[in-house]
Amino acid sequence: MDAALLVLFLGHLTAALEVPLDLPQPPTITHQSPKDYIIDPRENIIIHCEAKGKPHPSFSWTRNGTHFDIDEDPNVTMKPHSGTLVVDISRAKAEHYECVYQCTARNKHGTAVSSNIVVRQSRSPLWSKEKIKPIVVQEGVSLVLPCRPPVGLPPPIIFWMDNYFQKLPQSSRVSQSLNGDLYFANVLREDSRNDYICYARFPYTQTIQQKQPITVKVLNMDAINDTMAAFYNDTDLFKPADERKPTFLVPSGNSSSKTVLRGQVLEMECIAEGLPTPEISWTKVSSVLPAKRTSFLHYQRTLRIVNVSESDAGDYRCTGRNPLGSVHHTIHVTVKAAPYWISGTPRNLVLAPGENGVLTCRASGTPKPSITWAMNGIPIENSPKDLSRKVEDDTIIFTDVQTGSSAVYQCNVSNDYGYLLSNAFVNVLSEPPRVLTPANKVYQVIKNHRALIDCASFGSPIPKIEWFKDSRSSTLDGDPYIHHDNGTLEIQVAQAVNSGKYTCVARNILGIYENHIYLEVKEPTRILKQPEYKVVQRGRSVVFECKVKHDPSLIPTMTWLKDDGELPDDERSELIVDSDSLTITDVTENDAGVYTCIMNTTLDHDSASAELTVVEVTPTPAVRPDPPTDLELTDQKKRSVQLTWTPGDENNSPIQKFLIQYEDKLHHRGDWHNLTEVLGTKTTAHLKLSPYVHYSFRVLALNAVGFSRPSLPSRVFKTEAAAPDENPTGIQGYGTEHDNLVISWKVINFFKSNGPGLHYKVMWRQKTVDSEWTTVTVANTSKFVVSGTPTFVPYELKVQAVNDHGAGPEPAIAHGYSGEDLPVAAPENVQAVVRNSTVADVHWDPVPSKLIRGHLKGYKVYYWKERHLHKHNPHHSDQQVLTFSGNHTHGMLPGLHPFSLYSFNVRVYNGKGEGPASLPQQFETPEGVPGPPTSLIVTNPNLDSLTLEWNPPHVRNGRITGYTLKYQPVNNSNELGPVEELALPPNETSFTLPNLKYSTRYKFYLNAKTVVGAGPAISQEAITIMDEAVASRQVDIATQGWFIGLMCAIALLILILLIICFIQRNKGGKYPVKEKEDAHTDPEFQPMKDDDCTFGEYSDNEDHKPLKGSRTPSNGTVKRDDSDDSLVDYGEGGDGQFNEDGSFIGQYSGKSASRDTAEGHESSEAPSPINAMNSLNSFV
């Protein structure tokens, strides 16, 4: 019964499944460090342990058989989501962690354990210090130089070198043994040297240790005898070494034994000494040596057999032989075996509830290993009893398993030479089938090759796989199909008929799942025209052709080799690799060799070779090439043809290219057109043609001199008419009227019409309505007008090219709109938001698109000023328009007038025009600051008062709430005095200032105010009248003769100074007055004029500047063209006036007042006599 169950369950051994990670499953260890883990003591120790499972497993470790608490060791960390340990040796010694480790991965479905990981650090100990005495030997004797390297982990690699790090030469006479010693079958005089050095290289630490050098001195007995004979009269005191038959130095005796493990390397050595040098040979007693696994090293002294098996056990005989005899040694080899798997490791078992299954742990070894089982890391005999489980030696039989009995089982196989540990889980699941192979996967295979189509699946119970092709009329069984247990479908010899769509269906009692897979059988790659042997003169060109046929769906790659290596990669650019040829121009002797073309595709390849020979050439003058001949058309297809020709003579100049022309004898007889160009090294061209053309071809050759004559035309090749290959482009739909749709396109030329009777099928339908296509056929034109369409609705459009042989491909859909009309609605909810006195925002709701009746271009805001708010009479300003492109819902109106009433409306516009205006809306701008008063004049100047008169601002920007008057005195030095300020009511336009100082100049500032603030000021200057007593005293002085003489002297002195100034000015120098002015420059004065040496005029453009040094008269004006230093105003020949008593009154005369009206407010005045006297004092 048990045997029957075993046979019944063997099916599960070949159907082990990989459980998708989204399904519950016990842990599986996916990666672990090797059992014998040698580490580098200079690096951190990393002990790997990775596992998968659902849920993801947790990890723990044992060290030397006991629990290893990682949290207690600060030098050890575990990687996140992993069991890998990282030991930081920067704070600890590596030898502290030389232990035996074992990793455990567990989740709620089971526990998996790793093998025992023995961690040992590599060691490279130093050579022990020793003093080696020189070795003196007689010529011809044998010699052994011991190495005895230090014991390392792993063992070091031994080699012998000299002081210059050159390997010592070895031969059949001198060779190295397996333990590193250097053996001489016999020594010669040339073996004498003082630098025999044994080196040991330790691979893990990459360090090399060296032994102390050994000195060997070989004595020549003939020389010794000649020397000693002079003393002892004897010529044969020392006998040289005699020739002798071989004897073995290693191994000793006639026989020995050796034990080797299965799978390892067996090395046996026999080193013989003798004179002459013995030769070594090997045989296997009663058998032959395994030729494929056997090699001989160290000049036949070592026999090496790799991957040892039990058949390699037996007796091996080595023989040392020279002309004087031979010697034999027999080595008895015993092969033992550590445990090894017979049929692979135990495989995971997935069972549905109620199913049966078997876990098998098949292993062997010599001696026969013992097998023990564990469940979840616990010996199975100590695990909970399970009636569905029965253990029989290397097998566990499961019957009628139930949900919840999932576990991980460990199989441990061991003997004296090692052990094997493997985890295999039993996962009890109920799962409908699923196909793991990607859907719609495409397999490609070359014709006549084997095709394998995968259908990896999973389910519990195990799904049954069925295959169908194309119509799924029947399952694929029998020849040529082979079904594999893993679901793969095999076709041993694939043919084109096997291409197609395959469906694999996986089914079990819980459901069904199908997957579609595609097989493409491709044509093989074959070289049709192989490169040919070439003999070429030096300096000429040569072409190796390699024409290939391959499956058109595969992308080929051409590779060229020279002498089985890559093409030369130097500065020469004479190698030109084309898709089907290799061109070498300006050939040199170095180009000679064998060239191979290899055509590769993603699935296969083919190759061919040819040789190039280079010979010398005698140069001659070059002329135009002869025309090509023998034009031939081959490989004729509907749309292409292969044109070949024979080149004419190059005439001593290499052909650079060939020009291929064609004539259309059907449509344009006699007109030759350029079709294509090919390199001058080619003699064929694959020409792509158009339908419905009667082709005739000719070829011209071009060299450095010029083009050849055209070749004779080829025979006519007629391409059949066909339906158009393409449709018109540039399809547009638009309207020119509100009730039409114009469909336009770019016509295709006759060369692309592909046949007679070209016309167009025009189709349209409304896009938003589920309607049928309306179709009309039009002649060869570029547009069609559809009338009676609704206004501005979207349409789908198609235009297809048609000729007498059919229609072009299905046209792409274009989009357009019927004609536009004016919008029928105005924006609603129009309102304005005033930002400040000059800016307002306008907002509106967008007009619905269906009421726009066209492409929305934007919105226009019309606005105008109704009136100023401080005036009651209307004052309509010109209407202004602001345009806001696009789908805007607000806009800004800049540049408004403060304290004004505005009206506005909004209109939408499209490509046709504007819609109706919205209901007019109004808004008021707030008050702003006013402008300056219109004018400010001074009247009625008296001794201590004067009157100011003004007009209100022209730009009020609000209601005037009052005026602010500021004034301050200005002395003779133009320095400003303290400011007085008065507030005046808004209805006043004049004001008399009392209590002023007589004969004093004043500066006045007047500005208006609104509730927002004060505006800019207007300014004016005036002088009060002198006191009569002071004037009387001046008259008395002025009538005195001495005063008149003094004034004349002053005038003469001033005239002289002006003349000197003029002369100095012309010479470019500076006069004292100029230096003084430069040293005390006042920003209120302009410099002296260079042309007439007069003083610059004073300008009062900025009302708020202090008038330092101002000389403005009471009426504020003097003609600008008058010289500031002219004496006219003093009474000489000008408008200045004197009283009867001779006092100067010109600056108060009515003449100045008259200038006020003529010149405005900006003026300058000549200095008074008193000021002139002060100026004279400053010069002195």
Image (tube, grey):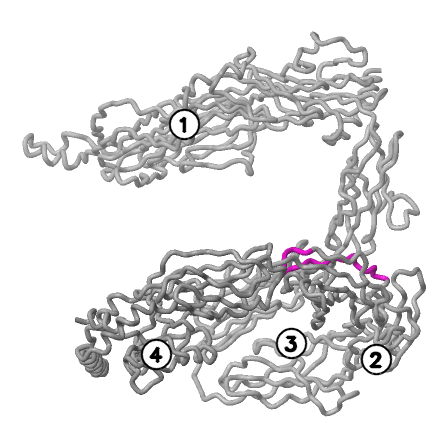
Q: Where is mark 3, residue-wise? A: 684
Judge whether residue 531 can be spotted in this image. no
Who comes first in sequence, dot 1 or dot 2?
1
State yes or no: residue 793 in magenta: no
Q: Is residue 845 above or below residue 7?
A: below
Q: Is residue 1023 visible?
A: yes
Q: Is residue 793 left or right of residue 652?
A: right
First along the sequence among labels 4 and 3? 3
The part of the chain drawn in magenta is 834-850
Report x, y in % for residue 103.
59, 19
Residue 842 is a magenta residue: yes
Give how far apart the Cα atoms at labels 4 and 1 are. 113 Å
| Front position among marks 3 and 2 | 2
- Few, some or many C-alpha atoms within 10 Å of disc 1 (few <14, some 14-19, many ≥20)? few
Please tell me the numbered disc located at residue 42. Answer: 1
Which of the marked residues, 3 or 2, is nearer the chain's N terminus?
A: 3
**Label 1: element kind:** loop
- Asked if marks 4 and 1 touch (Cβ < 8 Å), the reply is no
Q: Residue at x 33, y 62 (%)?
A: 975
